[in-house]
Amino acid sequence: MKALLQKHKQYLLTGVSHVIPFIACGGILIALSITFVPMTATGPDFSKAPALVKKMLTIGTTAFQLFPAVLAGFIAFGMASRPGLVPGFVGGFIAGMPQIVDGKSASAGFLGAIIIGMVAGHVTNLLKKLKVPTMFRPIMPIIVIPILSALPVGLLMLTLNIPIATIMVDMMKFLEGLQSGSQIVLAMVLGAMIAFDMGGPVNKAAFFFGAAMIQQGNYAIMGACAAAICTPPLGLGLATLIGRKSWTEEQRESGLAALGMGLVGVTEGAIPFAAGDPLRVIPTIMLGSMVSATIAMLGGVGDHAPHGGPIVLPVIDHRLIYVVAIITGSLVTAITINLIKKNSNPATTK
Amino acid sequence: MNFVAVTACPTGIAHTYMAAAQLEKTAKKLGHTIKVETQGAMGIQNELTQAEVDAADAVILATDIAIEQEERFANARKIQVPVQAALKDPEAIFAQAK
């Protein structure tokens, strides 16, 4: 059972790894084009925008529309390799089609894409097992499997579209209806997850939730993640600068590297520290990331790109609070780790 | 011993390359030869040829996602580990090959 789940996680991550650049392209182009037009009560007004800005918006939106298809397509690819692409892409594209739920436009989106991608992979793998006479073998991959897989997968997704879109709408309503109390809880959980394994599977789960929400038009989740992503390396780098005596020369060098990686939003910069001293370092960076995520969430920080750290500042809503969140979280990590190191037996300090 | 390896993580910007560096470093330390292919966000880099795979004693797959061109390793002796394992305890991976 565990091995089965592990495998499906690998399939899901294969899809995610291919779709992240699409969210980056879509999110950033849309955010940039919005900065060129006046903001009105009903949202950005593109009616008088220059042609190039409108085109930029169209290109960004297109990258977003491809999101469910690419996600499902590469989940199925991860499971069944090349024959999985057709049912995966077709099923995912259907999942991205707009549906009417409660009188509003919605789609089965990433949730539908994940489900249908997995289904497409399994269906394809079953079809690949069919024993056929040698003379028919060449037509299997180019005619038989594409049709026999896309047909049931497509039918299933067309049936599931409205139910899954309803779940998505409820989830978005739930996220948007969160009061500040529950917002703090959500932000703390996200922050803790981001810092916990510094770029590993737990971090990626929180990150992908934030990234998928960008495509749904909710930028707050990614905003909290973005602030949390960079505080572990920034905080630890800062700690080596503040308390030089507590750190070895090698660690001070990794501290500088960590600062650089923090600035470009790569949580992995904290790994060299955590690897040598996980019991002290991991709780400290989790604390810092929880602080920065909470400040960002309460301050209404939004992030339009699936990436974190100061480097995404141009596509951040409420930039000042974002910077404050990062600085505060990093300081919390830096001061805490230095205090712990100072009060601990130097013999056990690596 | 002579190894080839592939590293691949979901985002493909940090872990993939850190794992590759660790494997190279550890192989050198243990007196093995190794060539590591990375399948990161930039696609396949330092690609392994079929001849290199065939000549290797074992293939180390430090991967969290499905990799491309897996058919190259169909007949090879495979050691499959998560990317994290290459970062945390690379020597244990080489020990498995004995």
Image (cartoon, coloured by chain):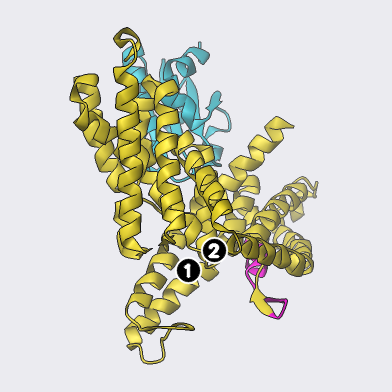
Chain colours: A yellow, B cyan
Asked if residue A161 lies left or right of residue A22, the reply is right
Identify the amino acid type marked 2: Phe
Q: Tell me the subunit letter for badge 1.
A: A
Q: Which mark is residue A67?
A: 2
Identify the residue at horizontal 56%, vertical 39% (top origin): B71
The quadrant the N terminus of chain A occupies is top right
Identify the residue at horizontal 70%, vertical 61% (top origin): A146
Residue A108 x %, y %: 67, 65
Identify the residue at horizontal 31%, vertical 24% (top origin): A339
Residue A147 x %, y %: 73, 64
Q: Quadrant of residue A253?
A: top left
Q: CA distance from mark 1 to mark 2?
A: 7 Å
Question: Magenta stretch: residue A92 in it?
Answer: yes
Asked if residue A155 lies left or right of residue B47, the reply is right
**Mark 1 and mark 2 on one chain:** yes
Q: Is residue A201 above or below residue B35?
A: below
Asked if residue A66 lies left or right of residue A153, the reply is left
Residue A314 x %, y %: 30, 64
SS type, badge 2 = helix
Query: Do callouts 1 and 2 mark residues in contact (Cβ within 8 Å)?
Result: yes
Q: Which mark is residue A63?
A: 1
Asked if residue A275 lies left or right of residue A342, the reply is right
Residue stretch in magenta: A89-103
SS type, badge 1 = helix
